[in-house]
Amino acid sequence: MIILFTDLDGSLLDESAYSADPAREALHSIRELGLPLVFCSSKTRAEIEYWRARLCNSHPFIVENGGALYVPDGYFPTDFHSPVSRDEYAVIEFGIPYDDLVQTLRQASQDSGCRVRGFHDMSAKEISRKYGLPLEQARLAKNREYDEPFEILDPPGDKLLAAIERKGRRWTRGGRLHHVTGDGNKARGVCLLSYYYRWTFTEIITVGLGDGMNDLDFLRLVDIPVIIRSKAAWKLKTALPRARVTDLSGPVGWNQAVLDILDEYAAEVDMVSKEKVG
């Protein structure tokens, strides 16, 4: 069984048009074969649920740079043990409360003398205007729980990032923004889900697709890491030499990479295509 873990912005979704249309051929093949496609993103739960509905996806998902893992109730044949049950999901929380992160960012900005502007400072209209998000999706992006995106107004911002680290918090860089987080990262959710998929299917091949430095940790874990061409591609490739790099960016590159992998592993896919999960 092939399990696909994917970033959204700049990977499956075009960064400008916020559309997955160029990847429709690969998405259709994934659905027809019954392969799990796990969204693993800096997006909020509300945003990911929007895209799950748009793309007819019913699989688990990882939100806000690994802040939490959501698994639909009954998805696996055995209970997914979780201390939190929320809206028909088992929820594994790796992050810390959003308000704590906002306070950390404010204090780090004061300590370092480096000005920042986070999503908590912006209205949905401003987020929509600055980052090209449709207003509806910008409102969903404001509904944060475990991760605060921010813009550094006094670059390069090294003192600010060091101040965040001194406060025991993590930071990462996505396609456009930095993020301050707690202990969570995308790799923790991918690792746990891979364990459950392996328990369910015994033999699995894990594929990871991402375009930013915040994807590096989970790309290191998978059997087939794929770097979607971007400004960060060379840094990712340097850190992970075994990774494949697409010729094209965004969902066009994503589409071709997935189709190539499905073709390469056609025998394995055909053998398990009837054993659908979810």
Image (cartoon, rainbow, N blue to C red):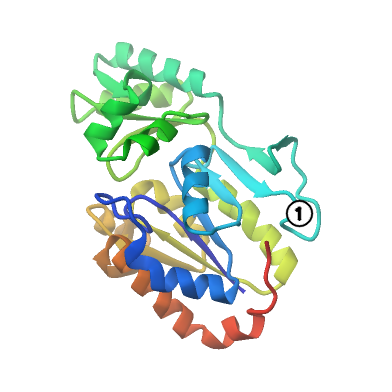
* Type of the residue with mark 1: Gly
Q: Position of residue 75 (x, y in %)?
A: 71, 56
Q: Nearer the viewer, residue 141 or 253?
A: 141
Q: Position of residue 241 (x, y in %)?
A: 35, 66
Q: Nearer the viewer, residue 270 or 220?
A: 270
Q: Could you say which quadrant of the image residue 177 lies in?
A: top left
Residue marked by disc 1: 74
Q: Quadrant of the N terminus?
A: bottom right
Taking the spot 33% from the left edge, 55% from the top edge, the residue there is 19
User: Taking 16 as reference, is 39 left or right?
Assistant: right
User: Taking 243 as reference, is 57 left or right?
Assistant: right
Under tag 1, what secondary structure? loop
Q: Quadrant of the C terminus?
A: bottom right
49, above or below 127, in the image = below
Q: Could you say which quadrant of the image residue 14 lies in?
A: bottom left
Taking the spot 47% from the left edge, 29% from the top edge, the residue there is 143
191, above or below 86, in the image = below
User: Taking 242 as reference, is 191 left or right?
Assistant: right
Q: Position of residue 51 (x, y in %)?
A: 46, 50
Q: Position of residue 65 (x, y in %)?
A: 47, 41
Taking the spot 25% from the left edge, 40% from the top edge, the residue there is 132
